[in-house]
Amino acid sequence: MLDFIRIGCAVPEVRVGDVAKNAQDICRFMEQADAENADLVVFPELALTGYTCGDLFFQDALWEGVKGGLRQIVEASASYPRLTAVFGLPVRLGMYLFNCAAVVSNGKLLGLTPKSYIPNYNEFNEKRWFSPAEDMPECILEVSLLGLEGDTIYLEKQPLFSLGDHTVMGVEICEDLWTAQPPSEAMALRGAEVIVNLSASNESAGKRTYRRGLVKHQSAACGCVYVYCSSGCTESTSDLVFSGHSLIGEQGVILGENSKYIDTGYLLLRDCDLGRVRADRLRNKSFADAAGKQENAGILWDLETLPLRSDGSLYPVKKLPFVPESQEELFERCQEIFAIQVAGLKQRLALLGASPVIGVSGGLDSTLALLVAVKAMEELGRPASEVYGVTMPCFGTSDRTYRNALALMEKLGITVKEIPIRQAVAQHFGDIGHDPNTHNATYENAQARERTQVLMDYAGMVNGIVVGTGDLSELALGWCTYNGDHMSMYGVNASIPKTLIGPMIRQLCGEPLFACAREALLDVVDTPISPELLPPDAQGKIRQQTEDIVGPYALHDFFLFYMLRFGFAPKKIYALACRAFAGEYEGAVVKKWLGVFYKRFFTQQFKRNCMPDGVKTGAVCLNPRAMWRMPSDACARLWLDEVEKL
């Protein structure tokens, strides 16, 4: 459902050599996982026997027990037709013994994956017992040799398995991940979207952190969901302690991890978003080029597999996808983006030998642009006084924003220019025959275009360039006046969403260069967002608030992120938004603004197709040269029809 898959890591309290007990525990965890609507449950390496059996692996009695346990698990799986289970067991084939993962679903053994790399260092000398995957013959195997009844399976070294909704899974075992060329890389390039690793990794100081880094890296490098499930602490402790460390990663992010350092007897469940995996692979042509060099063989499609059933309710969905949740991450993100902005403007100013000219309104966007300009000049070794700030009060300017604009410019030491534009706009109204009492688009746009004209002409006088202040959210909605505030000579905020600009200003308040303006900066952040193109109310306060007109920026930024970053359909974006904003916005409200978003996004593309230069600072950007290409006359019908059906 909506491309989510629910995955569990099950770590039973294994009893070494007691196959009957271990099989019973595996069946019990399968029942529990099924009750939790899991699509896939993964067990540790050699979970059926225990990893630390040693020379007992050569015993006929243990092999007979393995066949009986395998049969018990396969039969039990028939009761859970929507669950796939992967567990570890030793498999005898002629003169070879393989460390394998069995994939079981709906009363069938779908296949076996042998361990590719067999360690032989001090604590792990598996080569004493097991042969590597390269020794496994590729052939049709009668499952009766494994103590089962029914069909045959095809043996191969790195098989792929089809789960529900044509989701492709690959399996590797413990050491395979720690090598220079893990099998998961080839599996991912052959189409595996989910990689599971059955492991028996002993614990030592620092190893948990290293293991976590491996899973994060591999899930990112392979562009996949990576599931790591390791043996618990009831393995033999004669020489080693096993911690039961489990991790579920998705494209470089750890979605789930058990909390105890030494653990066993638990089920870790998480939802993973296959839609993200598929979207990134579709866009990443380097991944596709590498995939084209792989042999596309060995996919085991099970056409009887039922659809995935995860509803995504265990998947973390943030209300503000552009804004990191932890203070440490937020600080780092803001510093990084600010540095990119400054570097872009600095280079442009240096090449032109020009000064930045900014229309300072006392709002969020112009404030951030002003800070970028001041910092860029400092890095160029030029005084702040060579930054030219222009405030242009008109009909809608409030006392609060006017005072903040002046305070910011004076505190930061830039050159201040105040140019009231009321008379010029009134003259223009007379020239075109517009009634100034009619507060329509003409009334508003005339002010925006007059301000832009003033800035452009003033920049010519001071050898400057006009620094644009418009942000990503405004560009997405077309909330700007064409050839007015839409236009500049370099746009520093063009790829920064509205929901991140306030947090950025708060973070920058602590910088020594801007500490002198801290009070004004914080008041700017607390000021309602407004274009201030309509007269204030009787008390002189802002009457025109942007979010009352176009909708909450938090919602629009949410829609924008999932539409552009992953190409999700309205149905999925709506479902995610309803979950993220539960208790804040009803479904009907989300639907209303989602419709507004699509209408405005499609109809306003003509503004984006001729937007000024501006650096890309994040994964989502609407610059037609760097990121987003779309015809201005594209039709939104498909998207709006889907919104109507919600």
Image: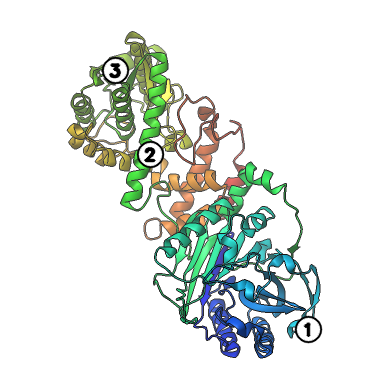
In terms of depth relative to the viewer, which is nearer, 392 or 172? Answer: 172
Foreground disc of the pair 3, 1: 1
Q: How is the image coloured?
A: rainbow
Residue 421 position in % (x across, y down): 29, 17
Is any atom of residue 508 visible in this view? yes
Q: Secondary structure at mark 3?
A: loop
Q: Residue 177: x and y, percent?
A: 57, 61
Observer-side mark, 2 or 3, equals 2
Neighbour tally class for label 1: few under 14, some 14-19, many 20 plus, Cα within 10 Å: few
Q: Is residue 122 left or right of residue 427?
A: right
When the figure is inspected, residue 535 is found, relative to residue 240, above or below; the finding is: above
Labels 2 and 3: the sequence-earlier one? 2
Find disc 2 in the rendering and name its residue. 336
Q: Which mark is residue 435?
A: none
Secondary structure of residue under mark 2 = helix
Q: The residue tagged with tag 1: helix, strand or loop?
A: helix
Label 1 close to label 2 by CB (< 8 Å): no
Q: Residue furthest top?
A: 461
Question: Is 393 located above or below residue 302 in the figure?
Answer: above
Residue 497 image point, x, y percent: 41, 40
Residue matched to label 1: 144
Lower position in the chain sequence, tag 1 or tag 2 = 1
At label 3, counting other C-alpha atoms closer than 10 Å, the crowd grade (few under 14, some 14-19, many 20 or more) is some
Amino acid type, mark 1:
Ser
Q: Which residue is mark 3?
A: 421
Label 2 – label 3 distance at C-alpha: 37 Å
C-alpha gap between disc 1 and disc 2 = 60 Å
Q: Name the residue rendered at 66%, 87% in the picture.
A: 59
Label 2 is placed on what type of residue?
Answer: Glu
What kind of residue is marked 3? Ile
